[in-house]
């Protein structure tokens, strides 16, 4: 007989809540999913999967203070989590704090092969923060990885043009 630890059970409950909430969202029941997540995260403030989903909903709704309230303890518990770091940077970027977003994203250097969205966000944030060389370098790295990505070519071209006009 296998006895599960309370952390295993908590993790499984978190996974199940995330799945249930995502299903509700797919069914067009965003309000119900949000209420489920709010209740669950209040009782389980370190539930990373459910917390990330709730933060993403809040960011989409521009409810930045509420997103930060959920995100802060999760980041304290999982300071090297790339997904949480990316959410925190996205929150900064959405609030017009591009430099802060760049600083957050530059604090970790995950493998570009597995974290293309992370680097795409870094390139965008760097461009908005007028850190054109960094933005170009990141887009170049992404294009080296997959030259068929049109969005990256557009980003690279935009930042290169903006950089030239700035000088």
Image (cartoon, helix red, strand yellow):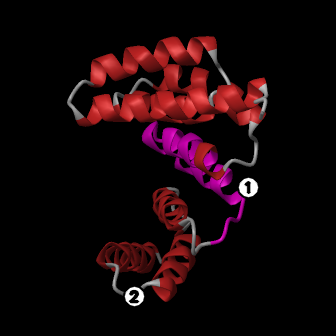
For label 1, the residue is: 107
Q: Is residue 93 magenta?
A: yes
Please provide the residue range marked out in magenta: 85-111
Nearest the camera: 39 or 67? 39
Q: Position of residue 49 (x, y in %)?
A: 56, 36
Report which quarter residue 24 is drawn in.
Answer: top left
Relative side of 2 to 116, left or right? right
- Say what secondary structure mark 2 lies in: loop
Q: Residue at x 48, y 78 (%)?
A: 167
Report which quarter residue 48 is drawn in.
Answer: top right
For label 2, the residue is: 147
> Of helix, strand and loop, which mostly describes the magenta segment?
helix
- 157 up-or-down from 86: above or below: below
- 30 up-or-down from 113: above or below: above
Relative side of 120 to 27, left or right? right
The outermost residue toward the front is 1
Q: Residue at x 35, y 22 (%)?
A: 33
- 112 up-or-down from 89: above or below: below
Q: Residue at x 56, y 46 (%)?
A: 89
> Which callout, 1 or 2, points at the residue further toward the start of the chain?
1
């Amino acid at each position: 007989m296998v006895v599960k630890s309370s952390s295993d059970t908590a993790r499984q409950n978190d996974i199940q809540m995330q799945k249930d909430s995502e299903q509700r969202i797919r069914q067009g029941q965003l309000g119900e999913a949000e209420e489920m997540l709010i209740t669950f995260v209040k009782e389980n403030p370190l539930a990373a999967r459910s917390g990330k989903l709730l933060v993403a909903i809040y960011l989409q709704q521009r409810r930045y203070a509420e997103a930060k309230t959920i995100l802060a303890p999760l980041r304290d518990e999982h300071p090297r989590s790339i997904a949480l770091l990316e959410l925190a940077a996205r929150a900064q970027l959405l609030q017009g704090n591009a430099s802060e977003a760049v600083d957050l994203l530059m604090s970790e250097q995950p493998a570009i092969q597995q974290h293309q969205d992370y680097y795409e966000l870094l390139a965008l944030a760097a461009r908005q923060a007028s850190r054109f060389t960094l933005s170009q370098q990141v887009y170049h790295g992404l294009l080296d990885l997959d030259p068929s990505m049109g969005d990256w070519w557009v980003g690279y071209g935009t930042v290169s043009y903006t950089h030239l006009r700035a000088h």
